[in-house]
Amino acid sequence: MPSLLIDNATLPDGRSGQQLLVVDGRIADIGPSLAAPADCSRVDAGGWLLSASFVDPHFHLDAALSFGLPRVNDSGTLLEGIALWGELKPQLTQQALVDRAMAYCDWAVGKGLLAIRSHVDVCDDRLLAVEALLEVRKRVAPYLDLQLVAFPQDGVLRSPNALANLQRALDMGVDVVGGIPHFERTMAEGAESVRLLCELAAERGLRVDMHCDETDDPMSRHIETLAFHTQRLGLHGRVTASHVTSMHSMDNYYVSKLLPLIAEAGVHVVANPLINITLQGRHDTYPKRRGMTRVPELMAAGVNVGFGHDCVLDPWYSMGSADMLEVAQMGLHVAQMTSQAQMRRCFDAVTANAAALMGLDRHGLAVGCDADLVLLQARDPVEAIRLRASRLWVMRRGRIVARTPAATASLDLPGRPSTVDWTLQR
Ligand code: FE2
């Protein structure tokens, strides 16, 4: 593969006028004035922001784009969503699952989203969704890293055959052990599910990613149990707690004990701001709780926090377009992370932090990393979030795989410029 020189890029750390040399699909050098081979091809970044590609650390690809099947979620609650998914499951076909997932992956690539961790429901004895998403993982591998989590949606203990199905899914090649302790019948069963699933992951040398305490109940404390077993089994850095919305409603004294335990165990946390701002607080009158986990406090405690999209056009959420900048923007608002430094950390939550929890070692903007890049019509990460900036081009392993025209409007105003974009001109 011929080498490639990317000219005139601005990087998220603020360096402008940078060149990146790409050799064999990887970043070989970065600097203001590189000695490139005479035969290398060139692409001009035009001074725009060049970032490592977006990463979604929490998604449900088996349900995506199924909106309206077999009906719409009227109450908008998590529990009606789970019930609706239960109605849809018997009607699923492998072909329909593959077709919808492939369509979503196309949306993702267009938005510069080149790595997704997707949960896949293992509570259907046929494991249709597992077979379908394994097939999709294979098909999209040239342009998108798809990591799959064996997710017992109806509870690994509560649902008959769920544990056996989960193990079958892992045997078939699913990457990560999932769970949903707050959906088990009792707190004790929830804690037991965390223990057995962590032990299963330890035995198999796999990572763990549980839906953990996705509830407004402040007494839902499975995150404590998850941190304990992570510590006990030496799974540091390999376990993720997704959602953890109960932490929003916990009392501050308990949280002050909990945060260091999560940090000590090296448990990653994923917040899903678009989904939890709509699903949580549904039993409240006013004031209504926001329900998202305590993102700035977790980050301040040294916990790695990623933001996930979670759902797009499915039984739980009727919006979405695979846009991780929309996710970052909502996270920023819900968490009130409005300082310049905090807004940049929200950008990290959909890039570097998400990649770290997925174990994507070659993601990033450093020598040796894969040239999986996105050129954004913005000058810095904060502007990219504000504008949900156009992805001027998307690169996978050194090859441009998607292009989007710059966002602009033609004006017809007396005495004013005839075109406008929304970047801050300096
Ligand atoms: Fe989820």
Image (tube, rainbow, N blue to C red):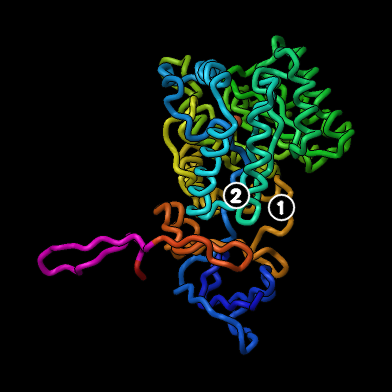
Residue type, mark 1 in image:
Leu
Q: Nearer the viewer, residue 251 or 348?
A: 348
Where on the image, by quarter, is ligand 1? top right
Which percent across, then down, holds residue 106? 51, 49
The answer to whether mark 1 is within 8 Å of ligand 1 is: no
Tag on residue 360? Answer: 1
Q: Are marks 1 and 2 in contact (CB under 8 Å)?
A: yes
For image coordinates 41% across by 60% down, the residue present is: 404
| 179 left or right, relative to 48 | right
Which percent across, then down, holds residue 166? 76, 26
Residue 74 seen by the camera? yes
> Sequence-wise, which precedes: disc 1 or disc 2?
2
For image coordinates 78% across by 43% down, the residue present is: 237
Which percent across, then down, holds residue 150? 71, 31
Q: Quadrant of the N terminus?
A: bottom right
Q: Residue furthest top?
A: 185
Q: Quadrant of residue 208?
A: top right
| 80 left or right, relative to 21 | left
Helix, strand or loop status at disc 1: loop
Which percent across, then down, holds residue 310? 55, 35
For residue 27, above or below residue 288: below
Q: Main secondary structure of the magenta part?
A: loop
Q: Would residue 129 be counted in the magenta stretch?
A: no
> Which region shows up in magenta?
405-424
| 6 left or right, relative to 378 | right
Q: Residue furthest bottom?
A: 38
Within 10 Å of disc 2 (Cα), the crowding (few <14, some 14-19, many 20+) is many
Tag on residue 195? Answer: none
For disc 2, the marked residue is 55
